[in-house]
Amino acid sequence: MKQFAPRVMACAIASAFVLAATTAQAAPAPARAEHAYLSQADAMARSARVSNVDYVLDFTLTGKESFAGTTTVSFDLKDTDTALTIDLDKATIKSMRVNGQAVTPVYNNWFVTLAPQDLAKGRNTVTISYERPHSTNGEGLHRMVDPVDKRVYTYSHFEPAAAHQMFAVFDQPDLKATYTVTVNAPADWHVITTTRESDVADAAGGKRWTFPRTKKLSPYNFSLHAGPYQVWEDKSGKYPMRLFARQSVAAQVTPADWFRYTNAGLAFFDDYFGIPYQFEKYDQLLVPDFLYGAMENAAAITFAEGGFLYKSAMTPAQKASLAEVIMHEMAHQWFGDLVTMKWWNGLWLNESFASFMATLATAEATEFKDAWQSFYQQDKQGAYAQDQRVSTHPIEVPVPSSANAFDNIDAITYSKGASTLKQLRHMLGEETFRKGVHNYLVKYAWQNARLEDFIGSLGQAAGRDLGKWTQDWLYQAGVNTISASYSCSAGKIKDFALLQTAPSKALPTLREQHVQVAAFKLENGKLVLAKNVPVTYAGARTRVPAMAGAACPDLVYPNYQDWGFVKVNLDGRSFQTARSTLGSVDDPLLRAMLWQALWDGVRDAKLPLDEFIEVALANAPQEKDYTLLGDVLGKVGSAKYYIDAMGLDAGPHRAWARRTGKAMEDMAWRGVVAHKGDENFQRRWFSTYLGLASSPEALARLAGMLEGKGTEGLQIGQDQRWSIIKHLNRYAFPGADALLAAESARDKSDTGQAAALAATVVRPDPKVKAEWLATIEDLQTKLPFSRVRTAMGSLYPNEQSALAEQSAAARLAKLPAIDKAAGPVFMRSYAGTMIPSGCTPQSVQRLQRAADSMKGLSAGTRRALLDTLQEDQRCVAIRKTLGTPKS
């Protein structure tokens, strides 16, 4: 799964148990806890008794708000000593048979309890017929009505444990099963699942689709999607491929790109793993309202429309993202679907491995050869930031129940995990690592495996014990820092060592890893590599004798080419060299690393924000590497974020803030003009300009561009029009509301409606804020959750701190009640956007009081609260670094 955004599940209320009509005495009380989620203990107890599971699933889909289904599950049962449960969420059960006998369901809206006396030791068959409303929150069997043409689309999403929102199932990853499916659906619908249909026949009200039995899959890897999708096919490669999307967005799809990257990936992974792709076809679907980036359903992968549909031609960055996500989900077909973790504590390994392999495949099998540079700039920096938060956690963490499966799914799970695999590959050697992966996949094919199984395969291939590596890297939190310590004599390095420090006394682990140490000299104003030494370091100090005798350097970078996962602290001389020579560094990855060193200085309150901005204004316009330019401009945008968060308009830095904001605006617009004729660079600069624009002149220019004025040759498509209109409304530009109304009438698509909502909510109007805050906090609202999430993300932009402050105390006070009532999926969105921060000492104190008193919050929400507090403290510290205002 590629995770871009959060999602929602409301808790059901247990109904009273009904005694089974066929029993003469009460069934033994089930050992399973009476709540909506499955604990690991209960899951392990169930899998110890149940094996050889097969599902026969029959669904009737009409396009209406509810659907009907019948699950027939056959399984072997080790004993009949106690009751057994089967998961089914909020359904209306019509009938139930256990081993051929009709029984009255014992059902609490979360799971059905099967009485011991109705079961048999050995083979059992249970049939449950039911009806259930479609989901509208992105889980289970989601239903969406296209606002353009009123067609109905459905798709399933089951991770981490939502298959039981669609059918009766043992909803845990280590009870793999086969699935045989039949579906009644409207005549103009396509039905897609893991296998290709074996028959489509006329039936009352439409067509009946029959699918052959699948291979053994965990429930979360099975899927079913149905609707009047547009379909494209490609049979040019080894495996037949199809691509599906809604009819109303079909014109935005570029099938050639999808099929090109998919074919390249399948060929790459077949070769890399030494195991052919295990399914008969490769389907991919673009689906609406999706809560993540994509999901690795076996042979029927789903992708969020919002991440991959554009109304203008895709930029290279967007194509690179598409290629990487296709590769990520494809890697899961082996590592995740073929071999699956036993429980949700192993989810990180699935995601880390897929993230690592996706970058490797993108770099080696597509035109995006700088994929590792992109990984460093984006994914890895997110992991570094996450790992320095108070809420950091080990890569491998306990997961008590399915409710906690996503508590720690974050940049540590994806990108730190991927980075540790990358550095382990460097340490073991590329071919040794590859051999270990191959052996693991062969040994555990169609089974469930644990972390020690994977590490054991790598260790056996390498002929070494990886126990200490595993303990240090996977079970201990925090990112270490390395720095170079050296002295020079007569222009040469006399002695050289790498110093490693731990993040804190609470996180004392020092780790072993393999890096490159590079020394550079300034020659004619350019940095030239003088010495590059591979080093395996461990402990607090590691001598590097091979560096002795090299020319005394002007800059040392102790993680050259980014082999290791470690924060770099440049020595004083190297830091000053980095500041003064950014434009003279030829290597884009090294340049990216030096930019990051400066930005780390800002984030750590060591380099004043205003000084960083001066460096950026001088150097960003000179950047010629497209990928790195995106990173540099992103840092400029982050600098503006801090300026807005600080609310400097009311203080002594008011003139500086306005002058600096105008300077950043002007730099970005000059970039737009300078790259006229180069659409990709021009769009990158324009995107930055749009994010920075706040002066009356800049806003007026944006408004004019909607009318085709002053576009400098830039194509202003529908996506750009909505971005401009939202921005104009954000700053209450005169006439922005009329522009919003006119655009809404012109673009009635789903994305248009979402964009109009965002533009409405973002307006700096107290009445608008109050109305939408009430909607967000109304857990019974009929508004689709995708729209609620859009509102959350648009309600309080940084520069509207005064408006945000009006509700800040009340929002914080309501946090425990909303957390308790809403459930983890809703709270992943809410806590990430609605916990108030203000970049003031008063805001920090308010958050600190909440953190001290709100100890009973769910794990995910408490973590979000602590992260918000820490980031508010960071913002206040950065504010203190601002120099004396200049006249």
Image (cartoon, rainbow, N blue to C red):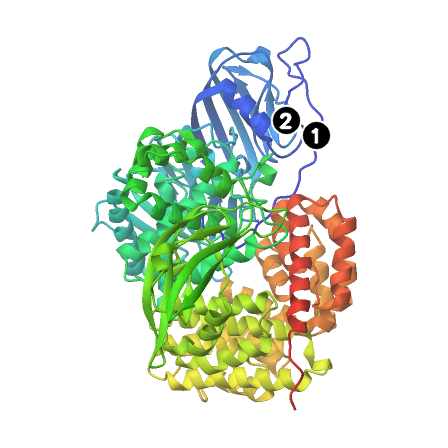
- Which residue is farthest top? 24
Q: Nearer the viewer, residue 187 or 290?
A: 290
Q: Nearer the viewer, residue 106 or 319?
A: 319
Mark closest to the chain's N terminus, 1 or 2: 1
Residue 291 in sight: no
Q: Amino acid at mark 1?
A: Ser
The residue that label 2 is drawn on is 107
Left or right of 714 in this view: 82: right
Q: Is residue 712 above or below residue 601?
A: below
**Which residue is drawn at the image coordinates 72% and 65% (left, top)?**
771
Residue 167 position within the rendered picture, expressed as x and y whole percent measured from the top left: 51, 33
Residue 316 position within the rendered picture, expressed as x and y whole percent measured from the top left: 35, 67
**Which residue is drawn at the image coordinates 66% and 27% (left, top)?**
33
> Image quarter for residue 19?
top right
Q: Is residue 600 above or below residue 415?
A: below
Q: Amino acid at mark 2?
A: Tyr
Crowd around label 2: few <14 · some 14–19 · many ≥20 (10 Å): many
Left or right of 343 in this view: 543: left
- Which residue is farthest bottom? 887
Residue 305 position within the rendered picture, expressed as x and y whole percent measured from the top left: 45, 58
Residue 770 position within the rendered picture, expressed as x and y whole percent measured from the top left: 74, 66
Q: Is residue 474 above or below residue 107?
A: below
> Image quarter for residue 730?
bottom right
Q: Is residue 634 above or below residue 829?
A: below
**Which residue is drawn at the image coordinates 49% and 81% (left, top)?**
617
Secondary structure category for the residue under label 1: loop
Where does the C terminus fall, quadrant-wise? bottom right
Residue 765 in sight: yes
The residue that label 1 is drawn on is 15
Q: Are marks 1 and 2 in contact (CB under 8 Å)?
A: yes
